[in-house]
Image: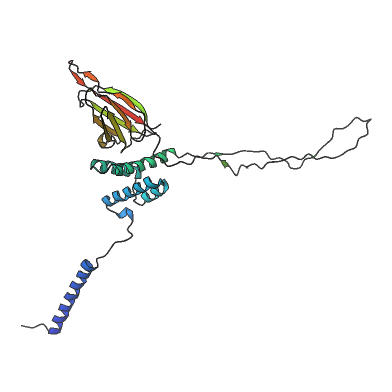
Amino acid sequence: MKRIPWWRLGALLALLAGLGLGLVYSWAISPPRIVEAQPAALRADFKDQYRSVIAAAYAATGNLPRARARLSLLGDADPIEALNAQAQRMLATGGQVEYPGQVAALALALDDEHSSVPVSTPVVEITQSVDNSATATSPPPPPEVPILLTETPEVLEIQPTPTLGAPTPRPTRTPIPTLGAPFTLTGQESICDSNLPDGLLQVLVLNSNRRQLAGVEIVVTWDGGEEQFFTGLKPELGNGYADYIMTPNITYTIQLARGSDVALGVVAPTCQTASGENFFGGIKLTFQQP
């Protein structure tokens, strides 16, 4: 049997020992660290944290252009929809109230800015050119009167006017980043549908473009009590939809925490089925930004 020379065996052992030491150093002692990664390369949960930090910074500073620039680094196809979807997920998982509210507020501010940016229309003034040279002439006097001709030029003050090649745009309003105007109660109707739960209060919240808004806090109060609930927790019914079960014979007052008209004297109506049986119906309220 042929034996392996000792020097070859030593070289093999040294190679294995070096490989093992290299793995221990690279995995345990000094593992590689990924730095300066682009936000678009983050995991989905890390992207949610990134949006939450951006929303918190906007809530503190009100700097909407900076928030928009930071969101663009995530590479979302629609940043507004991404923010609304995250606010719904945060509310569904029972996160702290201020965090989904900040995310939804940033989405609302971006949507308001997109829908309210005015378009400047240039106004062109066409002015006929005026001859700068003015020559004064005197009317011919009667032939029997001796005349003395004097030339007195009339000075015309000419104001510079824009020409056709240099249009003067109208001044435009600079949009101020806000959370939007207070909401108006645009609809209140009684719903008598035996297929719905008794005393169901349905609330729909829209912006000025009739786009449903998620993450809007709704405050319902009654004699001796108060509760809050949010839109967007049932996305299958709409991002701006929310509901609440009213107790029969209790009078409620409903308004949006962000500022809105107040719906007073809301009570579950008494309805009848086709067979004459009584049941408690519901109320549907619609709030919209003007």
Residue placed furthest toward the front: 224
Which is nearer the eye, 195 or 264?
Answer: 264
**Which residue is located at x 29 percent, y 54 percent?**
42
Image side of residue 160 versus residue 279, left or right: right
Up the image or down, 187 lies above or below 42; here it is: above
Q: Quadrant of residue 22?
A: bottom left
Up the image or down, 15 lies above or below 192; here it is: below
Q: Quadrant of residue 16?
A: bottom left
Q: Can residue 78 be seen in this view?
A: no
Image side of residue 186 versus residue 283, left or right: right
Q: In which quarter of the image is residue 20?
A: bottom left
Quadrant of the image for the N terminus? Answer: bottom left
**Which residue is located at x 33 percent, y 54 percent?**
39
Residue placed furthest toward the top: 276
Which is nearer the eye, 81 or 263?
Answer: 263
- Which color scheme is applied? rainbow
Up the image or down, 184 lies above or below 279; here it is: below
Image side of residue 140 versus residue 186, left or right: right
User: Where in the figure is residue 23, as x and y percent of width and height?
Assistant: 20, 69
User: Where in the figure is residue 105, as x and y percent of width and height?
Assistant: 35, 41
User: Where in the figure is residue 58, as x and y percent of width and height?
Assistant: 38, 46
User: Where in the figure is residue 176, as x and y percent of width and height?
Assistant: 45, 41
Q: Can residue 188 be seen in this view?
A: yes
Quadrant of the image for the C terminus? Answer: top left
